[in-house]
Amino acid sequence: MTLTVVVNLVAVLGLLKEKETRARLIGGLLKLCADQQVDGYYDPALLRSYGARYYSFILAVVCMGAVAIVVPLVLRCVEWWESGQPKRSFGLWLGAGSTGHARAMPEMDGPTCLQESTQAG
């Protein structure tokens, strides 16, 4: 899940930087056209259309990233709900710990495990 977030963050930052670069290039081109008195050949509305294009790309990347995170979580929840216990350890299900590595926890057997932990405490 962390890798998905990082990859999507890098993609969004790259798109934002590319949008900024394109705006500068087109802005310079518009100034050049105005200086050469041929500014009627290049429409300034292109800046707005490129901006909208980049925002739609960013929206697509964010949506795909959200789907890549939500779908596995939903499948794990459904798996847990149907079986009464997860087929994988809760440590992997919950994600990484403070060290950045997946926490290793024993398999939980649903209510039995909870009863043992409450009786011990």
Image: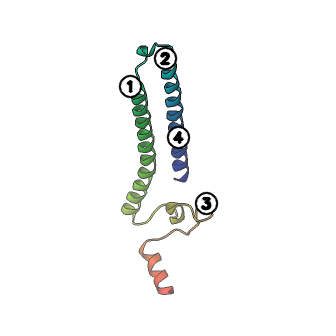
Q: Secondary structure at mark 3?
A: loop
Residue 100 numbered tag: 3
Q: Nearer the viewer, mark 1 or mark 4?
A: 1
Say above or below: 102 vs 114.
above
**Relative to 66, is 7 on the left or the right?**
right
Q: Nearer the viewer, mark 3 or mark 1?
A: 1
- Mark 1 to mark 4: distance in Å? 26 Å
- Mark 1 to mark 2: distance in Å? 14 Å
Say above or below: 18 vs 73.
above
Residue 45 numbered tag: 1
- The three-letter code of the residue at mark 1 reads Ala
Q: Secondary structure at mark 1?
A: helix
Q: Position of residue 20 (x, y in %)?
A: 51, 35
Mark 4 touches mark 3? (CB < 8 Å): no
Circle 2 is placed at which residue position? 33
Which of 77 and 70 lies nearest the eye of the viewer?
A: 70
Label 3, residues with CA under 10 Å away: few <14, some 14-19, many ≥20: few
Label 1, residues with CA under 10 Å away: few <14, some 14-19, many ≥20: few
Q: Position of residue 91 (x, y in %)?
A: 54, 65
Q: Position of residue 15 (x, y in %)?
A: 51, 37
- The three-letter code of the residue at mark 4 reads Ala
Which of 99 and 81 lies nearest the eye of the viewer?
A: 99
Q: Tell me the colour scheme of the image.
A: rainbow
User: Which tag, 2 or 4, sits closer to the chain's start?
Assistant: 4
User: Which tag, 3 or 1, sits closer to the chain's start?
Assistant: 1
- The three-letter code of the residue at mark 2 reads Cys
